[in-house]
Image: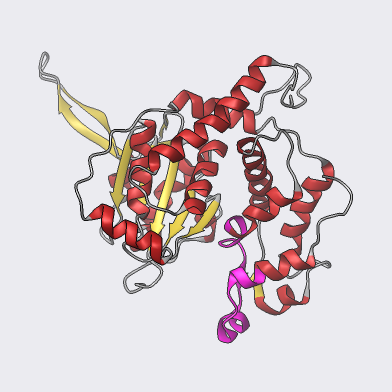
Amino acid sequence: MSTETTARGAAVDVDLSSPDDLALADRMKVGRDQIISELKKLIVGQDDIINQVLLTLFVGGNSLIVGVPGLAKTLLIHTMARVLELKFSRIQFTPDLMPSDITGTDIIQEDAATGRRQMVFSPGPIFANILLADEINRTPPKTQSALLEAMQEHRVTIQGRTYKLEEPFYVFATQNPIELEGTYPLPEAQLDRFMFHIVIEHPPEDEEFLVVKTTTAIQEPVFERPVSGPDLVAFQRLVRRVPVADPVMRYALSIVRASRPKSPNCPESVKKWVAFGASVRAAQYLVLGGKARALTSGRYHVSFEDIRAIAHSVLRHRVLTNFHAQSEGVTTDVLIDRLLEAVPAPRSGM
């Protein structure tokens, strides 16, 4: 996505004196609340998960959702597409899936008028607004790589020709963390293209009771359309114009740099347990996610708390542990906790 700029190329911040900017910011906050209200017609609980998915929408990123079967990963994304009335495609990733099964391919088609045969492009399921890559790690890396260009540039190249994908475009991928037989680890280059690594846990007893109660009865919800596709594109542009104070941006960057074992400022826990730290995309998504979180909270600036609140989801798949951590049972989430303790937010500022 491009950032709005002046004639000199400088970024244009949200204008607090502009009725249009204020109205769009208010529309985004109200739209978020309306989307949540509509999702609640079918989804029970999972408030934190829903918030992270909505931040993904407002930033224009992609997210990896990990959880055991039966926690409504697929249902959540499908319901969200229904609420927003966006074109939805689901691909069940399997070992025999081919790249062309995702992107599409050229086929021979006969012209009924002339009888001549010609190659015609048949679009694959990636030509959608929301693509659900279900159990993405069940297909080999060659097929997984078919998503790389789409996730980053929102386009696909087939037989030397490039096709733009319709905006907005999102990839939501799911994984089952307990059944690893017959799976293929996602390449680091692909993992890095996911804004968030969202972990879904079993809900509390009261919520689980409601899940059982509602899903064993007839469910025929009627959804209203609170936000459109063009609205989401406008929100994404607005998010990028939210101002960020230098101390907040440096704080986000300090967290990312401290996650790298070769950094002189990394804590002992990183030196001991981390093989590879986070990339520059982590800092970008910390800032962008912080901007979206601020706007949906009714604020026009990013705070240190906005950065901390999304740090685990942004860093979880980018900080790779070494053998020592695995042998000692040290998880990535524990390392991120240590990282946030070791890189305190400056006292002065917001």
- Which of 210/97 is in front? 210
Q: Find residue 182 and report its horizontal and vertical position in percent.
A: 31, 71
Q: Residue at x 45, y 29 (%)?
A: 167
Residue 109 vertical position relative to residue 279 in the rendered view, above or below: above
Q: Find residue 185 and report its horizontal and vertical position in percent.
A: 44, 66
- Which of 307/102 is in front? 307
- Which of 142/245 is in front? 245
Query: Number of labelled discs?
Result: 0
Q: Residue at x 40, y 48 (%)?
A: 146
Can residue 145 be seen?
A: yes
Q: Residue at x 40, y 66 (%)?
A: 205
Instruction: In the displayed orientation, state which residue is furthest to the right.
Output: 348
Q: Find residue 193 and report its horizontal and vertical position in percent.
A: 54, 50
Q: In the image, is residue 332 part of the stretch drawn in magenta? A: yes
Q: Quadrant of residue 125?
A: top left
Q: In the image, is residue 114 part of the stretch drawn in magenta? A: no
- Left of 9 or right of it: where is 295? left
Quarter of the figure with the C terminus:
top right
Q: Quadrant of residue 343?
A: bottom right
Residue 136 vertical position relative to residue 155 in the rendered view, above or below: below
- Left of 81 or right of it: where is 278? right
- Left of 244 or right of it: where is 293? left
Can residue 137 be seen?
A: no
Q: Find residue 252 and report its horizontal and vertical position in percent.
A: 74, 52
* Colour treatment of the image: secondary structure
Quarter of the figure with the N terminus:
top right
Q: Residue at x 67, y 44 (%)?
A: 290
- Left of 298 or right of it: where is 347? right
Q: Which residues are magenta?
A: 313-335
